[in-house]
Amino acid sequence: MAAQMALAADALQLRGDIETAESLRAMARHNRILGLKLRVEHGLAPLPSRDRARRQDSATR
């Protein structure tokens, strides 16, 4: 849904409605952040710091 909001914001900006486009982009960012927080709280997504540490460990092996 956030990706669709971002695409709609791009279309609005192309049509000259810059203020609405910026508002829609802000809502899309908020939705992405909220979605990630919910996934982390429910254990459906790794915490970013843990994921980054795993990638660094595997890169040094």
Image (cartoon, grey):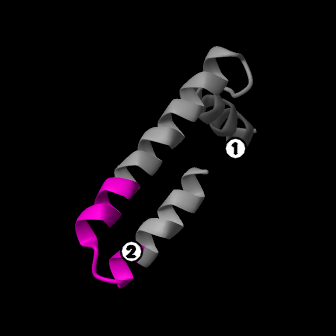
Picture coordinates of residue 28, whole percent (x, y):
46, 50
Q: Does 44 sit above or below residue 32?
A: above
Q: Quadrant of residue 37?
A: top right
Say which element carries label 1: helix
Write the residue at 61% across / 51% down.
1
Q: What segment is highlighted magenta in the picture?
A: 12-24
Q: Residue furthest bottom?
A: 15
Q: Which residue is mark 2?
A: 12
Picture coordinates of residue 17, whole percent (x, y):
28, 74
Q: Quadrant of the C terminus?
A: top right
Q: Please indicate whether residue 44 sits to the left or right of residue 19 in the image.
A: right
Picture coordinates of residue 54, whole percent (x, y):
69, 31
Q: Amino acid at mark 1?
A: Ala
Write the residue at 74% across / 24% down.
44
Q: Does 34 sit above or below residue 9?
A: above
Say which element carries label 2: helix
Q: Does 20 sit above or below residue 57?
A: below
Q: Please indicate whether residue 13 sits to the left or right of residue 37 in the image.
A: left
Q: Magenta part mainly helix, strand or loop?
A: helix
Q: Quadrant of residue 4?
A: bottom right
